[in-house]
Image (cartoon, rainbow, N blue to C red):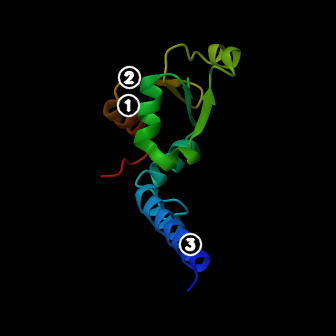
Amino acid sequence: MDKQNIATLTFVAVIIFLVIFFDAKYNIGSTKPNLYDDFAKCLTEKNAVMYGLYYCSHCQEQKATLGDSMRFVKYVECTENSQYCIDRGANEFPTWIIGTSTKVIGFEKDKTMKELSDATGCVLPQ
């Protein structure tokens, strides 16, 4: 083998290693259901909406708790929709509004997930 072939094989091997490493670490391309998928889908079916701010640490914590399942949750970014959020009574963050009346203001992620479960009847994963 000449030097160019060795360099090409080395490059390909490094790329394959990186793809395998990052896929294992971050589930890139994974279709495996997340622990919270059913809970998040149920929240949406019960008309629960999360109102938040991208820089809000409690919002980020709740999004992280739900992980990839956030894709099933209706989320309103209030920095981009401030009047909409104000009109709905979301003035502390995160605020979850279920339907037209129930409001859950979540500063503690575990307590908030439990309150959402109680308010909607959606079952939290164990």
User: In which quarter of the view is residue 47 placed?
Assistant: top right
- Disc number lying in front (3 or 2): 3
User: Outermost residue, bottom direction?
Assistant: 1
Distance (Cα) linking label 3 and label 2: 53 Å
| Three-letter code for the amino acid on which mark 2 is drawn | Phe
**Label 3, residues with CA under 10 Å away: few <14, some 14-19, many ≥20:** few
The numbered mark, 1 or 2, whose residue comes first in the sequence reads 2
Q: Residue at x 55, y 23 (%)?
A: 53
Q: Evaluate whether residue 18 shows in this view.
A: yes
Distance (Cα) linking label 1 and label 3: 54 Å
The numbered mark, 3 or 2, whose residue comes first in the sequence reads 3
Distance (Cα) linking label 1 and label 2: 7 Å
Is 114 placed above or below 101 here?
below
Give the x, y percent position of residue 8: 59, 74
Is 87 placed above or below 25 here?
above
| Three-letter code for the amino acid on which mark 1 is drawn | Thr
Pointer 1 residue: 112
Q: Evaluate whether residue 105 shows in this view.
A: no
Pointer 3 residue: 7
Q: Are marks 1 and 2 in contact (CB under 8 Å)?
A: yes
Q: Residue at x 35, y 51 (%)?
A: 125
For label 2, the SS is loop
**Label 1, residues with CA under 10 Å away: few <14, some 14-19, many ≥20:** some
For label 1, the SS is helix
The numbered mark, 1 or 3, whose residue comes first in the sequence reads 3
Quarter of the picture holding the N terminus: bottom right
Q: Are marks 3 and 2 in contact (CB under 8 Å)?
A: no
Pointer 2 residue: 107
Give the x, y percent position of residue 52: 55, 25
- Between 63 and 1, the one lying in front of the other is 1
